[in-house]
Amino acid sequence: MNIPILYEDGEALVIDKPAGLPIDRPRRGGECLEDHLEQLKLGFQRPPSAVHRLDTDTSGCLLLARNPKAHKRFAAAFEAQAVTKVYHGVLAGIPAEQEGRVELSLAKISSAEKGWRMIPAKKGKPSLTDWKVIATQGGYTLVEFHPATGRTHQIRVHAASGIGHALLGDPVYGSKAGAPRTMLHASAITVAREGKTDIAATSPLPADFAALGFSES
């Protein structure tokens, strides 16, 4: 598997993570990002490490740190909300509004039947996502998401419970029908750095978005 590099300097890489590639090794075994870290050393002695998470199904921009000090600084930037992220997703339906803001606190629950998932809960962690419709096609909607926080499954829950339409192909918060994966793509990331130029990368919409009629143009 060839993993495209969207940004590179002495302390950071941003890769274009393929959909279906988990960051951590699945319990059942199988390929994960770790298997590709050696090729992503690119002449450095240390392999890079992922600073944040993307779901296995989610494609697009993933920030890797090339040394432990950089990893610590980047992690602090995420904590301080000094990282700007843009996502695109396909909703299984057409929302009533063209744009909006979802503010739903999220909490994790688990059951033997369904496993774990996130739900809106007053006592959960605050989360905020701005969104706007980009295009509609065949009963589906391409939406641009700007999450101000980075909670687990935030966009997926905010789409289903806040906008009222789950992401296409989402087996947890919607239905597997219509797509072979949850249709979510990390399109851009910007990380502010003191005394240095910002880390900035963008990833074009992937082929499975284009197959549904959604492209960059």
Image (cartoon, rainbow, N blue to C red):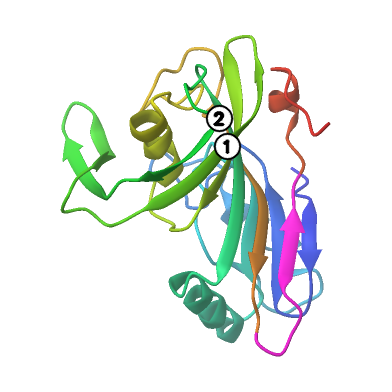
Residue 25 in the image, given as x and y percentages of width and height = 47, 49
Q: Nearer the viewer, residue 75 or 141?
A: 141
Q: Compared to 147, does 90 lie above or below? A: above
Q: Compared to 96, does 51 lie above or below? A: below
Q: Compared to 17, does 167 lie above or below? A: above
Amino acid type, label 2: Gln
Residue located 19% across and 42% down the image = 109
Residue located 81% across and 74% down the image = 43
In the displayed orientation, state which residue is furthest to the top: 138
Residue located 78% across and 28% down the image = 215
Label 1 to label 2: alpha-carbon separation: 6 Å
Residue 64 in the image, given as x and y percentages of width and height = 63, 66
Residue 198: quadrant of the picture: bottom right
Residue indicated by mark 1: 132
Span highlighted in magenta in the image? 194-203
* Dot 1 crowding, Cα within 10 Å, few <14, some 14–19, many 20+: some
Residues tagged 1 and 2 counted as in contact (Cβ below 8 A):
yes
Amino acid type, label 1: Lys
* Dot 2 crowding, Cα within 10 Å, few <14, some 14–19, many 20+: few
Q: Nearer the viewer, residue 136 or 67?
A: 136
Question: Quick one: label 1 or label 2, which is nearer the N terminus?
Answer: 2
Q: Is residue 81 toward the left or the right of residue 133 in the image?
A: left
Residue indicated by mark 2: 98
